[in-house]
């Protein structure tokens, strides 16, 4: 048993994905970096994002009721941080961070073309929780870079060089330790080797 310290309640759940969410309202688009996000339902596919009311994006999300979750790779680490410390109120973050807007397939908000994975979302519910408004949303389309598909058209996300966020720091995803269900999967029997005749 390890010795533990006990702290007051806080949001100490890590690691988290860190994403760049794009939204569009009044003819303008914006990017906001978010770590308070997660999958909340498989069928229908749903996720949530939590946004403080003082963010410029908050009003845009309320107005348009749709957004795109752009999942960045290591290459976009700098831009991801930048879009989380500068407001779209006074800066065009696409231009400033040298990110390319591209049309989404279902929603009006643009994608960030440089990111390998996009989840287009429509907001179904808005909940004011306290410091943050949680937007519950249905995923209405997914776009992935073709370069991430393997020979069997499986999405090989492990090739994407994904970013994770841990208590104020960004990390590149580490080594693979196993796959879903590996703890119960029977090991393949080793092929018997025939003894060579003397
Ligand atoms: C790594 C990281 C994670 C963040 N996560 C959130 C979040 O989950 N919710 C939120 O409201 N703001 C979050 N922020 C802060 C916003 O991204 C930041 O205030 C941004 O400048 C708001 O942009 P906007 O005013 O253009 O909407 C995060 C910032 C960083 C750098």
Image: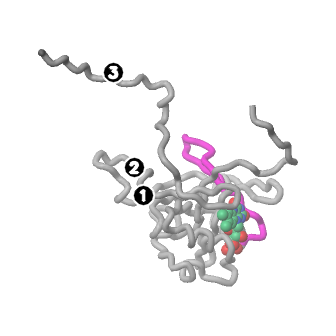
**Which residue is found at the position 50% from the left and 76% from the top?**
99
User: Quadrant of the image for the C terminus?
Assistant: top left
Q: Does label 2 point to a residue whose CB lies under 8 Å from ligand 1?
A: no
Tell me where the magenta segment starts and ends, as one range: 37-55
Quarter of the figure with residue 185: top left
Q: Which residue is mark 1?
A: 144
Q: Does dot 2 land on a helix, a strand or a loop?
A: loop
Asked whether residue 68 is drawn in magenta, I would say: no
Task: Using the numbered discs, state the Cα–Cα distance from disc 1 to disc 3 in whole angstroms.
Answer: 36 Å
Image coordinates of residue 190 in percent, x first then y, are 31, 23
Q: Is residue 15 among what the camera can see?
A: yes
Q: Which residue is mark 2?
A: 155
Q: Residue furthest front?
A: 198
Counting other residues with Cα less than 10 Å from the Cα at mark 1, is it few (<14), some (14-19), or many (20 or more)? some
Image coordinates of residue 152 in percent, x first then y, are 30, 45
Q: Is residue 94 left or right of residue 192?
A: right
Image coordinates of residue 104 in percent, x first then y, are 47, 66
Q: Which residue is mark 3?
A: 189
């Amino acid at each position: 048993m390890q010795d533990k310290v006990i702290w007051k309640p806080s949001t100490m759940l890590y690691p988290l994905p860190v994403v760049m969410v794009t939204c569009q309202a009044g003819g303008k688009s914006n990017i906001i970096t978010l770590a308070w996000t997660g999958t909340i339902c498989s069928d229908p596919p749903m996720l949530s994002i939590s946004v403080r009311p003082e963010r410029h994006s908050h009003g845009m999300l309320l107005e348009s009721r749709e957004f795109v979750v752009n999942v960045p790779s290591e290459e976009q680490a700098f831009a991801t941080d930048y879009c989380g410390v500068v407001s779209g109120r006074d800066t065009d973050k696409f231009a400033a961070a040298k990110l390319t807007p591209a049309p989404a397939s279902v929603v009006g908000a643009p994608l960030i073309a440089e990111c390998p994975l996009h989840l287009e979302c429509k907001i179904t519910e808005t909940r004011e929780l306290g410091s943050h408004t949680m937007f519950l949303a249905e995923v209405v389309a997914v776009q992935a870079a073709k370069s991430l598909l393997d020979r069997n058209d499986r999405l090989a996300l492990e090739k994407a060089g994904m970013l994770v966020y841990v208590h104020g720091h960004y990390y590149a995803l580490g080594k693979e330790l196993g796959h879903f269900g590996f703890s119960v999967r029977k090991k393949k029997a080793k092929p018997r080797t025939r003894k060579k005749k003397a």
